[in-house]
Image (spheres, rainbow, N blue to C red):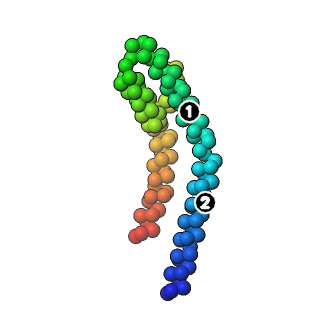
Amino acid sequence: MQETNIRLGIGFIVIFLYMLIGAMVFVRIESPLEQTLFDEYDSLRSEWELKLAGKGFDATEIDNLFANIKYMAEMGIWREQNVTADYSWSYGRAFFFAGALLTTIGKRIRDKI
């Protein structure tokens, strides 16, 4: 019993170290790009704030505009130049999703019985 606990503890330590090293690698790889994207966003935001303020928008309206655009983009809604975009929940995609639920979640329920 004690040997099993030692092996289990060593396994947890190995997994933790693996995840720690992986996190360090990803931070080193992704941080420069993320900083570049933040700088680009700040530049674009400043540019559009100047344009919109010149058209009579106040800071609250500009913040709301950016917040609404962000929210819709996060929800998967994005259209450029009034072009019709596909809906996320077409019958084909919904059918695929239902099949994925049936084959993954349904399997776990069946295994517990």
The residue at 49%/52% (across/down) is: 100
Q: Amino acid at mark 2?
A: Ile
Q: Position of residue 28 (x, y in %)?
A: 62, 49
Q: Which image quadrant for residue 13?
A: bottom right
**Label 2 neighbourhood size at 10 Å, few (<14), some (14-19), many (20+)?**
few
Location of residue 3 with respect to 112 vertically, above or below:
below
Would residue 84 be seen by someone viewing this image from the given angle? no
* Quarter location, residue 108: bottom left
Secondary element under disc 1, as helix, strand or loop, is: helix
Measured as percent of width and height from the top left, residue 79 is found at 50, 26
Measured as percent of width and height from the top left, residue 38 is found at 54, 35
Tell me the quadrant of the picture where the C terminus can be found.
bottom left
> Visible in this render: residue 62?
yes
Numbered mark located on residue 27 in the image: none
Label 2 vs 1, first from the N-terminus? 2
Quadrant assignment, res 64 = top left
| Foreground of the two, 97 or 45 | 45
Q: Give the class, few, some or many, for how many residues have Cα within 10 Å of label 1's Cα (few <14, many ≥20).
A: few
Pinpoint residue 80: horizontal percent, then vertical percent: 52, 24
Q: Which mark is residue 39?
A: 1
Identify which residue is drawn at 45% across, 68% down: 111
The reply to whether the C-beta atoms of the residues labelled 2 and 1 are less than 8 Å apart is no
Residue at 39% across / 13% down in the picture? Answer: 56
Of 87 and 69, the residue lying toward us: 69
Which residue is identified by label 2? Answer: 21
Against 71, residue 100 (above or below) is below
